[in-house]
Amino acid sequence: MRPLAFLSLLFALAAPAGLHAQPASTHADLVELFFAWRDFHAPAMTDGIPDYSAEAMTRQHRALLTWQQRLAAVDTTGWPVAHQIDWYLVRAEMNGLDFAHRVKQPWARDPAFYVWFYPSPTDVPEREGPNIHGAIELPNYARPLAAGDAAEIAARLRHAPAVFAQARTTLTGTARDLWVTGARSIREQSADLDSFAETVAGAHPDLAAAAREAQAASDEFAAWLEAQADAKTGTSGVGKDNYTWNLRHVHLLPYMWEDEVLLMQRELARSHAALRLEEHRNRDLPKLSHIGDAATFDRLLNEAVTEYMAFLAEEEILPMKPYMDAALRERIGAFYSTDGLRGFFDEITYRDPLVMRTHHYHWFDLARMRDEPHPSPIRRTPLLYNIFDGRAEGMATGMEEMMMHAGLFNDRPRARELVWILLAQRAARGLGGLYQHGLEMTLDEAAHFASKWTPWGLLPADGGTIQHEEQFYLQQPAYGTSYVIGKIEIEKLLAEYARQREGRFVLSEFMDAFNASGVIPVSLIYWEMTGDKSMLEAAVGGRQE
């Protein structure tokens, strides 16, 4: 056998299952590699239980190098920008797995990773945070539950004892804040299972029994975690250098940890200063009052959707789609009364329901992904490691202020105050996440910092909103700043896109092209929409890096 043929044979034998022996050379080859990569990424399943043992994770991390080499061997010379972007998306996911193994290690450090049951939907393409493969996403099942779906959920719930038994062997980390808040998450799972069992007991008694069994296993696991907590004294943040690597190579952002601190501090100061000027301008107007009853809530929330949709259409903000109105009305929710503070975002909504309709751009995104899937199979598949966060959260956050500037609240001057409070809260909690990962604050200190810098006392440090947000930002580095940093990146894109069309800028055309790019990192959308690759190159360097 000739040497070259012999080497090719060795390479083919060494390649992971599902890969071509020869390097990919077309976009179709890249798509095939992508789906083979996704199969590899998923942990091995044994009797419905994902394997996160130390041995399995070591094997996966070792094999990752082969996948990275195969991707690097893809020759994208001459490919259109849209196809090159897909290549960068695959590389970002592979870098995400590398970061998970080298730094985050949620299967060993974070008990919340093992939550097995999620009863509520997420507003982004994929569940936020690092989550165990195979967890039950109840919103994925049509309601009322069909008999077959009920049986399937019951079978999966009955895997919970084995999942938690494995977790007792894999959770070897010492990260105190992750451990303590993770135990809380497992307790909350128990409460969710209890509520779920109550709702299905009449129609599906076996499913209710399975939920009760999973609840008992969850309670036992939580008790074990709580018994271990005093021995967990380590730090939970990833450190500044690791945080920067994750920003650049996973989320494709051209920043360091220190850069994000500076930008977030600037947005925090700007939001506070703008709020005080708004309050001064409105000083002779009556204060906003809370919605006080269910009938008023339902009427005002539906009127807010109607007003917002009319504004988007009449002002030619973006092309209107049939699914948009329903996407917002489905998320209205129900009124509830309380003697104290509601959650932060309810405090905003109960003062003026129009404001948060702008942030619900999330539901436009999800409806669009469902009804108008991207032509590329890679982009229509939700990205791993929440790589979409800057686009998804940045646009939802950006719409609040952009719609204010576009005139949505011209007749609601007090609502403008709420827009600045939203920005201040997101900047403050994002800074808390940064300080945690910079090893400058504990989670509790970050929560108090965010509470201090959120106006009107709407975010108590011991409240559920900020406690859960700071926990999540600790679990998933870069997510906590994505709301504000993503907004900034989108503003950069809008500025350059409009500059290139000086005198010919049409907002609805910008929004249409922006949406058509998919829910992917803004640096890639910037390249696609402007032809300028500099934002991406500032993050990751050239193609050969």
Image (cartoon, rainbow, N blue to C red):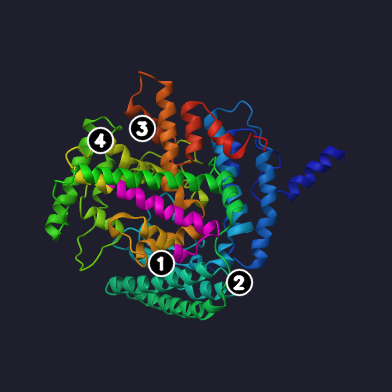
- Residue 511's tag is 3
Measure the C-alpha gap from mark 1 to mark 3.
39 Å
Q: Earlier in the sequence, mark 1 or mark 3?
A: 1
State the residue at coordinates (53%, 66%).
Answer: 110
- Residue 47's tag is none
> Is any atom of residue 239 visible in this view?
yes
Measure the C-alpha gap from mark 2 to mark 3.
47 Å
Q: What is the magenta segment's predominant secondary structure?
A: helix
Measure the C-alpha gap from mark 2 to mark 4.
51 Å
Residue 242 percent across, percent down from the top left: 60, 53
Quarter residue 228 falls in: bottom right
Label 2 is placed on what type of residue? Thr
Q: Earlier in the sequence, mark 4 or mark 3?
A: 4
Which residue sits furthest top?
503
In magenta, the rendered stretch is: 419-445
Residue 365 percent across, percent down from the top left: 37, 43
Above or below 161: residue 377: above
Residue that numbered label 4 is attached to:
312
What is the quadrant of the N terminus in the image? top right
Measure the C-alpha gap from mark 4 to mark 3.
11 Å
59 vs 476, left or right, is: right
Q: Residues within 10 Å of mark 1 (few under 14, many from 20)?
A: some
293 vs 487, left or right, is: left
Residue that numbered label 2 is attached to:
172
Label 1 is placed on what type of residue? Ile
What is the quadrant of the C terminus in the image? top right
100 vs 531, left or right, is: right
Q: Is residue 1 magenta?
A: no
Residue that numbered label 1 is attached to:
153
